Image (tube, helix red, strand yellow):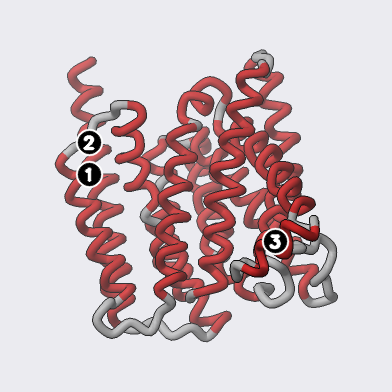
Amino acid sequence: MFTLKKGYLYIALSTFFFSTMEISLKLVAGNFNSIQMTVSRFFVGSLVLLPFAIKHLKAIEVKLEKKDLLLFAWLGFVCIVISMILYQLAVMHTKASVVASIFSCNPIFVLFFAHLLLKANIYKHNIIALILQIIGILFIINPFATKLSVLGIILTILAALTFAFYGVCGKKSTQKFGGTIVTCFSFIFGSLELLLLVFISHISGVADLLISNNLDTFANVPLLSGYTLSSIPVFIYIAVGVTGMGYCFYFLAMEYTDANTTSLIFFFKPIIAPILAFIVLKEVIPINMIIGILFILTGSIYTILCTMKLQHSLDHQIA
């Protein structure tokens, strides 16, 4: 019982950190370049995870081979260089509450990538949940009278899709090493890969080409600018709290509870994040968004309940 309580505590802490992610990023969006923020927060976050990863690596007595490091580099590229850049740009172009709600759909996307890449089964309840979440997204977007940035919505959906792809690509490694190790090293590699691109962005010919194609955000990316007395505490919270401790608590929750219970994070977040965005950023929550969130939550809850029922049935058959 004590172990289970610790699991729920880790879920609560991870949920809080993840629910404040978009709001925190929005607060300092004007201080930092999107690429700068991404490379900085994930590098610092990976350093927070590193002691836990090393401890776990020693505990399982498994040595990292060259092929493992190459896979971590690939995972880092997908997660940091692609997905999190799309995510950071999405936060810049639309409401924090919208990004939080739509991004929380990524567990459903995971199911479909798992089916395509790992031949995992897709059940009827998965299809129903996906339909409910798509309806929820459509209500949030409100295409017939939208005042939201279409670009911001597209970036958010692409970020969720690519993050789900990252999760599925790392599934076998996670089973071998554990989530903490895979996440830590993929964050390190991804940050270093993005840092290399930052250096390339300062080459005059490359910078001129990017600027001429209206990609100013990716040209001459700064690394040390934007840090002020007001932005430094927020950055520390994002890097150490949200990115480092948020993921740390997430994987600790998975150790003390099951995957279905841990996934509660992703349907609490669409409730908490808009409320916090309203309090902190004064973002209005229109009725269409409330309806959309309810559809997303219904889809998430339905998936978890059906998965738990299915697992119970399988356990009963095995017994």
Q: Amino acid at mark 3?
A: Met
User: Badge 3: how crowded within 10 Å, few (<14), some, or many (20+)?
Assistant: many
In the image, is residue 233 above or below residue 203?
Answer: below
* Element type at mark 1: helix
Instruction: Specify which label sits upstream in the sequence, 3 or 1.
Output: 3
**Which residue is labeled 3 in the image?**
37
In three-dimensional space, the C-alpha distance between marks 3 and 1, rounded to whole angstroms, equals 35 Å
Do callouts 1 and 2 mark residues in contact (Cβ within 8 Å)?
Answer: yes
| Horizontal side of residue 115 vs 147, given as left or right | left
Quadrant (top left, top right, bottom left, bottom right) of the C terminus: top left
* Position in image of residue 11 (x %, y %): 50, 49
What's the residue type where badge 2 is placed?
Ile
Q: Is residue 119 above or below residue 3?
A: above
Residue at image point 61% right, 48% down: 81
Q: Nearer the viewer, residue 301 or 142?
A: 142
**Where in the figure is residue 318, as x and y percent of width and height?**
23, 15
**Where is mark 1, residue-wise?**
126
Residue 304 shows in the view: yes
Say whether disc 3 or disc 2 marks the residue closer to the N-terminus: 3
Label 2 belongs to which residue? 122
Q: Secondary structure at mark 3?
A: helix
Name the residue located 50 percent from the left edge and 72 percent from the top edge: 96
Whole-percent x, y for residue 165 in the image: 44, 41
